[in-house]
Amino acid sequence: MSRHPCYSEEAHRFFARMHIPVAPACNIQCNYCNRKFDCVNESRPGVVSEVLTPEQAERKVKGVAAQLMQLSVVGIAGPGDPLANADKTFDTFARVKKHVPDVMTCLSTNGLTLYRHIDRIVELGIGHVTITINAIDPDVGKEIYPWVFDEGVRYEGREAAALLISRQLQGVEELAKRGILVKVNSILIPGVNDKHLVEVSKKVKELGATLHNVTPLIIAPGSQYEKDGRKAPRPRELNQLQEQLSEGGTKLMRHCRQCRADAVGLLGQDRNQDFQLETMEADPVIDLDAREQFQQELDSKIRQRLIAKENRRTILDENKKTRVAVASRGGDKVNQHFGHATEFMIFDTDGTEVKFIGIRKIQAYCHGTADCNGDKDETLQEITSILSDCRILLSSGIGDAPRAALNKAGILPLVRKGGIQEAILESVKYGSYFENINISKG
């Protein structure tokens, strides 16, 4: 678990994951999804450049493992449901275990047929399973799932939702009893399950889920929700719900990037295009000793970070905290220009301790053209609104216009490079800016 970038907030800064797209079929329909729509430039669950056969997946995993020494997890998350493609899914996992035995394996599913495959999951040593559970009340679920298909029978409406929910909860409980780490993903859908997710969180925790990950609704083009005109939640709505769940004792994943089903690299990065199948050697040499030595060095870095935090033993004073937004392309560094950022990492600090809060998605300021033409004023207004509770913004570069707009909004834009934690602590000490503003706002 300490090397799994989804289960460990510290690990996601150092260890990489790989999603293998071998499962195109799905056995349920979600109102936010349209599996016919696919775009290589999109980054959302269910999107892939191409679907691989188990043989092709084996070749690609071996090629990536030989080059990407920090690869610690190989997962199957689609583009459909892995257990609706069970033969291909388990064949692929068996090949991965045989040829790259040092990686952890991870499975993501909607849970409809999960109960039938638990023995096989245990047999193959799949130690992490993610189940997407958006409701535990069929009356809520019927607004999300128009139908499910199981053993030749199509179920619709409330009946479909009730069947799916019962199978999902059964899966959580049985996996937890067998020692499998279970992460539950839930999609925050305003007006549908936004109030209900507190009950979902309580229930899955009771059944043994290790982690709950609540992510904002992404509406696929052509989906029912797009036709209905439904809107995604504002970042503030997601943050408020996460805080409510956290206060209730739920262990949350706050660093999710809602990855594509063929993503490769660190969370926040997608290097799939760097590892094209046609460029892979047929039988690359995988130096397992070198990989283990490299990953042990990463383990050491994580331990040092945790020890440093423990030694400080500083609890953030809510009346003295400073909220900081960071533009990053990954690698635990401030290394992205403001104009190119499509998300910001949000942190709270009191000048000694740094606490990760979550991710906020935005429309990039420089969108569509190299010279940043377009409706920049409206985009900039949206960005400042999303970051309105932040007092500092760190990026590797920023233009005069956004700098002025952020300053006017009470957000201090600073150009920094290097490690995120170090840059945040350095920036909080910068000048006398914080002596003259109310840093507890937000």
Image (cartoon, rainbow, N blue to C red):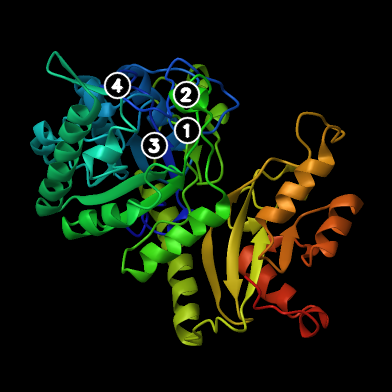
Q: How many marks?
A: 4
For the residue pair 290 and 164, the one nearer the viewer reads as: 164
Which residue is denoted by mark 3 in the rendering? 286
Sequence-first disc among 4 and 3: 4
Which residue is denoted by mark 2 in the rendering? 48
Residue at far right of view: 400
Q: Give the structural element (helix, strand or loop) at label 4.
A: loop
Callout 3 amino acid = Ile
User: At 45% from the left edge and 29% from the top edge, which residue is drawn?
Assistant: 262
Sequence-first disc among 1 and 3: 1
Whole-angstrom CA distance, mark 4 to mark 2, is 14 Å
For the residue pair 166 and 50, the one nearer the viewer reads as: 166
Which residue is denoted by mark 1 in the rendering? 260
Whole-angstrom CA distance, mark 2 to mark 1, is 6 Å
Callout 1 amino acid = Arg
Quarter residue 191 falls in: top left
Which label number is shown at residue 43? none
Tell me if label 1 and label 3 are in contact, CB under 8 Å: no
The location of residue 119, given as percent across then percent down, is: 8, 37
The location of residue 116, given as percent across then percent down, is: 9, 31
**Residue 158 in sight here:** yes
* Residue 303 located left or right of residue 163: right
Tell me if label 4 and label 1 are in contact, CB under 8 Å: no
229 lies above or below 266: above
441 lies above or below 22: below
